Image (spheres, coloured by chain):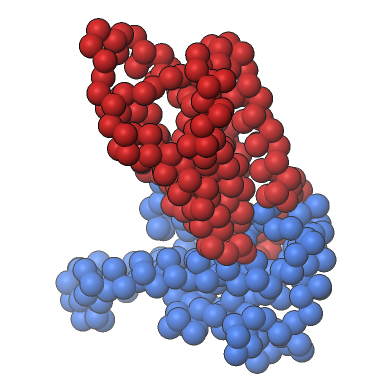
Chain colours: A blue, B red
Amino acid sequence: MERSSSSGDRMSGGGGAPVPSAAGRPRVPDADWSVLMARSQDGDQLAYATLLKSVTPYVRALAARVGLTGDDGEDAVQDVLLTIHKIRHTYDPARPFGPWLAAVARRRLIDRTRHRSRRWRRETALTEAHETLAADEANYQEAAGEARRLRAAIAELPPGQRQAIEMLKLQEMSLKEASARTGQSETALKVAVHRAIRRLRSLLDGTR
Amino acid sequence: MTTTDDFIESLAGDLVPVRRLRPPPLRAALWVALAAVLVAVLVLMRGVRADFFDEIRDPAYWVQLAGAWLTGATAILAAFEVSLPDRSRAWLLLPAPSAVLWLYGFAYGCLGHWIAIPAGAPIAHDSVRCVETIMMAGIPMALGLWLMLRRVRPLRPSGTAFVAAVAVAAVADTAHLLIHVVEASLLVLLVNLAPVTIIIVLGSLLGRRGLRPV
């Protein structure tokens, strides 16, 4: 699984959370998003975090509409947010933000649903029996404990380091792929992994 | 595992100011002006075609020349518009009317009046010079457009690459039409239509990946 588990701001939560209307356009004052995006383009991190949190329920609802829910849905939402991040310079603040966002989200979700149907055609899902019976190590309770400790330690890492470890070590992406996905340089990712491993070592040594 | 909230925090933490793209009509106007300068420089370097002052009295020549230039100009605008996420795909059709004029010029001049290659004509020499002109106009245009569109990171790379390639081919052909006399039908096909087609096909195929789509 890539990036998963949901955030707190579900559609039902939070006052004034935007939802897609029947026409597929978000029902929020578009001007607010436009202003936030314009400030984000100027480097305002707070405005950017506010904007991304504000659009997340809308993107999540669009993802659900095309059948992407649960972990798949969250991966899709994060993919859309990452795409917004990469092409934020293409937004023109003189135009409404809603259609720009809807076009980016729709494009990314279409790509994901296509990718998912291709994957379904060539893969069979593993059942619990496959995992517990086929591989010896899956039955070692001790190893399972180690894995739990490692997962807990990874969860304590700062976001940048955690993302680098997840992409490069857990998902075994290449530096190039991870760099393309995160928009960070390969050197920055290497440094993040190096620091993450050092931090994990100290965290795990501390819990022994 | 990264929650969406953590992910947002990491994106916001990495945020740096970005330079907004200028509106597509403005960028297109700049590029049309640059293309005009490029064509003018080539005409000055290589000289206008020998029969230019006879040809300007022929409406068929004007139709083809205007068709090529307008196709180039409208295709540049279409490429900049369609590379943005919130613009309609209908922009892809903008160069179509002028492309019809341009293609009509090819068909009229080449297939309507089939002219055989005259005996003893310096075909190889003329052909090389024609292709040279097309490359001298096409390569700087292609590189410039590629660099500008690459910065956009288009969500629709195929359509963007296609209209950008049409723009390059049309501007290059405008220079060719102003500089070279090619009367023989077979030569028109070989040194004019063939390079234009190759630019469009190759540009579409290479441009699609080269534009760094997201």
Looking at the picture, how far across and down is residue A11, in whole percent? 63, 87
Q: Is residue B211 visible?
A: no
Height in image: A186 above or below B153?
A: above
The answer to which of B81 and A138 lies nearer the viewer is: B81
- Asked which quadrant contains residue A155, the reply is bottom right
Which quadrant of the rendered structure holds the N terminus of chain A? bottom left
Looking at the picture, how far across and down is residue B27, in whole percent? 69, 43
- Asked which quadrant contains residue B56, the reply is top right
Looking at the picture, how far across and down is residue B71, in whole percent? 53, 43
Q: How many marks?
A: 0
Q: Name the residue located 46 percent from the left edge and 42 percent from the top edge.
A: B102
The answer to which of A170 and A78 lies nearer the viewer is: A78
Height in image: B126 above or below A134?
A: above
Query: Is A181 on the left-hand or right-hand side of B111?
Result: right
Q: Is residue B147 visible?
A: yes
Height in image: A113 above or below B70?
A: below
Q: Name the residue located 75 percent from the left edge and 65 percent from the top edge.
A: A95
Query: Is A130 on the left-hand or right-hand side of B97?
Result: left
Looking at the picture, how far across and down is residue B193, in whole percent? 36, 33
Q: Name the residue located 55 percent from the left edge and 16 percent from the top edge.
A: B48
The answer to which of A29 and A192 lies nearer the viewer is: A29
Q: Residue furthest left?
A: A134
Q: Name the residue located 57 percent from the left edge and 64 percent from the top edge.
A: B88
The answer to which of A134 and B105 lies nearer the viewer is: B105
